[in-house]
Amino acid sequence: MHVLLIEDDALVASGIQAGLEAHDFVVDLAMSLADGRHAMKVSSCDAVVLDLGLPDGDGMTLVREWRESNLDTPILVLTARDALHDRVAGLQGGADDYLLKPFELDELVARLHALIRRAAGRAHPRITHGPLNFDPLTREITVSGRLVMLQRRETTLLEAFLQSPTALLTTDQLKDRMYGLSDDVESNALNVHIFHLRRKLGKGIIETVRGLGYRLGSPEAVDVSQASSRPKE
């Protein structure tokens, strides 16, 4: 999952970024309104984590701008403002959730998963595709109840397809989900990860639409023979 973090305190930002990345989030960091505005223009994300006290203005300025432009990306606000009227004003202004500082990383992760799940129209955190079952919280993947071991990038790529099971995803969209705004990406990296997913889950798990991109294959394309012989405990 891809998150845009907008936080001007370098120490706080690095801690949040490291914590989210440890939970397999791809995190782009912006430290001002201007940087956050630019990041959202050039890259898509699954959710925004937004601090209100930024050096060039109030974070709610961005919330209002994005909502007025019909951007519906979930926004979780981080703030030390604990007054009820501040929280009410933020939610009425377009924020989806509030988390008061200081907070525990586990709560932030859980709230982000809930926001992203809600935005995708799913009530249950687990995603199923035929015999394949994916838990976004534990990052565990099973096929017919048996574990499948994927690398971190492979899991992120599979998650992108599972979250948009009927969508045609372009190469740029998939790279954005996997790497964010990072420029340090080898040109063939996406092809390599798709190759490994097909090898581990079945050749038809990801379909190539020549000249356009990729999409998730049918549930019947999942190869149950590739799952670990060890059942999930």
Image (spheres, rainbow, N blue to C red):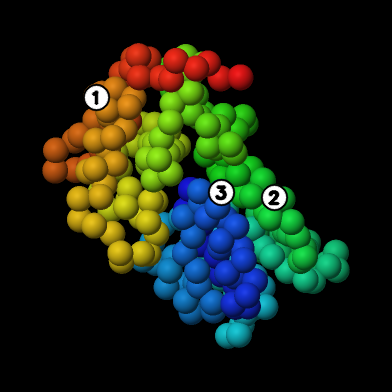
Q: Residue at x 49, y 60 (%)?
A: 27
Q: Position of residue 122 (x, y in %)?
A: 57, 33
Q: Position of residue 42 (x, y in %)?
A: 36, 66
Judging by the rendered image, the residue that carries numbered circle 2 is 106
The number of discs equals 3
Q: CA distance from mark 3 to mark 2?
A: 10 Å
Q: Amino acid at mark 2?
A: Asp
Q: Amino acid at mark 3?
A: His
Q: Position of residue 126 (x, y in %)?
A: 56, 29
Judging by the rendered image, the residue that carries numbered circle 1 is 203
Q: Earlier in the sequence, mark 1 or mark 2?
A: 2
Q: How would you rate the neighbour count of disc 2 (Cα within 10 Å): few for under 14, some for 14-19, many for 20 or more?
A: few
Q: How would you rate the neighbour count of disc 3 (Cα within 10 Å): few for under 14, some for 14-19, many for 20 or more?
A: some
Q: Residue at x 69, y 55 (%)?
A: 105
- Observer-nearest residue: 131 or 229? 229
Q: Residue at x 60, y 57 (%)?
A: 19
Judging by the rendered image, the residue that carries numbered circle 3 is 23
Q: Residue pushed farthest left?
A: 211
Q: Is residue 63 above or below residue 157?
A: below
Q: For the residues labelled 1 and 2, say whether their Cβ atoms are less than 8 Å apart.
A: no
The answer to whether residue 100 is seen in the rendering is yes
Question: For residue 161, what is the image quadrant?
Answer: top left
Question: For residue 153, what is the image quadrant?
Answer: top left
Q: CA distance from mark 1 to mark 2?
A: 36 Å
Q: Earlier in the sequence, mark 1 or mark 3?
A: 3
Is 92 placed left or right of 128 in the picture? right
Is 53 placed left or right of 138 in the picture? right
Q: Earlier in the sequence, mark 3 or mark 2?
A: 3
Q: For the residues labelled 1 and 3, say whether their Cβ atoms are less than 8 Å apart.
A: no
Q: CA distance from mark 1 to mark 3?
A: 28 Å
